[in-house]
Image: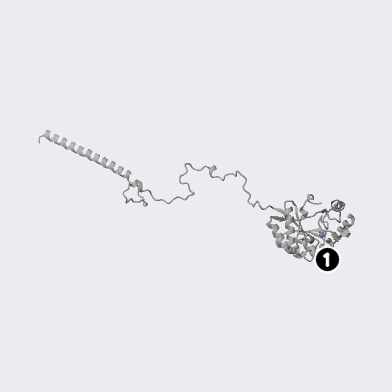
Amino acid sequence: MNSIEAKKDTAIRAASRETLKRAAAFALAFLTLLSFAGCARRDPVDPYEVVDITGGSEAETAAPVTPAPPTEIPTEAPTEAPTPESTATPEPTFTPAPTKDPSVVTRRVYLTFDDGPSKNTPEVLDILKKYGVKATFFTVGRFVSVYPDTAKRIVEEGHLLACHTYSHDFSIIYQDPDHFVADVAKWRSAVKKAVGYDAGAYVFRFPGGSTNSTIGGRSGRKDYLKAMHKEGYLAMDWNLGLNDKWLAGNKDHLPIEEYLWKSYQETWSYFKDKPPLILIIHDTEPASVNLLERLIEDLIAKGCEFGLCDELTEDYLM
Ligand SMILES: [Zn+2]
């Protein structure tokens, strides 16, 4: 091989090496591209992947099994973060509905016991204590003197000790207003002596009521009221009652307690919406005392609360 041929041979070998190098580089680049393309097509490893054995395509069958979201959570993510306004408690825009049963009307009722104290009055006080109810006792002075301890108990247990004259004798008290006032003064002395101090109240009740025939009805009572006002007293009648001093009204000859209950229900029906509701009971009558628990429970069931007569304003008194 001459020198020219040797150079030519060397050039050819170099060219071949260069071609091989380029071919190798091209092949490497091609393989790399293929490799990336393959990675792009491969799904990430999913342990919950469902393998299709029916021959369907991967895209249709390989949805991952995830637990169903709780129904109260929205299935779509919010598009923006909640603002402080949207998470704050909304201001009420209407009046809330009343929580109390509207069919139960709160009424104030005044239990009043007339003509005692009597041997039945301690039982009345026990029942009132059991129910936590306060009442007004329109007492007769001469019986206050007979039952001083009971009179004292009336006051000590938070009830109102009110006046129903000393004698309760129509032939004495209704002679004229002066006799009436003098009889009331005797009542007040009897109370002071029994209780130990001037424990009476300014409310009083006329024996027989303010319109009884002996006093002369509405016109006849005027002078009596005027005389009593001078002494600082105001009068009150009643609207609810048992007719326990009017047994002649029992025309159907009902058993006594049935008659009293019927009378009470009749007065309730008539006066229930005409306050103040003032119930007269005679604690001298055993049948009335026997009904007392039933009466109190009935009044509570009717939505009543109980008050003392000295809370009534002059608008309701005479
Ligand atoms: Zn009386």
The quarter holding residue 277 reads bottom right
Residue that sits furthest to the front in the current view: 252
> How many numbered marks appear?
1
Disc 1 is placed on an element classified as helix
Q: Residue at x 73, y 62 (%)?
A: 258
Pinpoint residue 229: horizontal percent, then vertical percent: 85, 52
Pinpoint residue 317: horizontal percent, then vertical percent: 80, 52
Q: Is residue 241 left or right of residue 65?
A: right
Q: Closer to the camera, 195 or 180?
A: 180
- The vertical placement of 252 against 53, above or below, is below
Q: Closer to the camera, 3 or 215?
A: 215
Q: Closer to the camera, 274 or 96?
A: 274
- Give the colour scheme of this rendering: one colour
Residue that sits furthest to the top in the current view: 4
| Amino acid under disc 1 | Val
Q: Residue at x 83, y 64 (%)?
A: 143
Pinpoint residue 267: horizontal percent, then vertical percent: 74, 55
User: Which quarter of the rendering shows the N terminus?
Assistant: top left
The quarter holding residue 269 reads bottom right
Q: Residues within 10 Å of mark 1 (few under 14, many from 20)?
A: some
**Ligand 1 picture quarter:** bottom right
- Residue beneath disc 1: 146
Pinpoint residue 95: horizontal percent, then vertical percent: 62, 45
- The vertical placement of 166 against 17, above or below, is below
The quarter holding residue 192 reads bottom right
Q: Is residue 103 left or right of residue 226?
A: left
Q: Residue at x 73, y 56 (%)?
A: 266
Q: Is mark 1 within 8 Å of ligand 1?
A: no
Q: Closer to the camera, 136 or 64?
A: 136
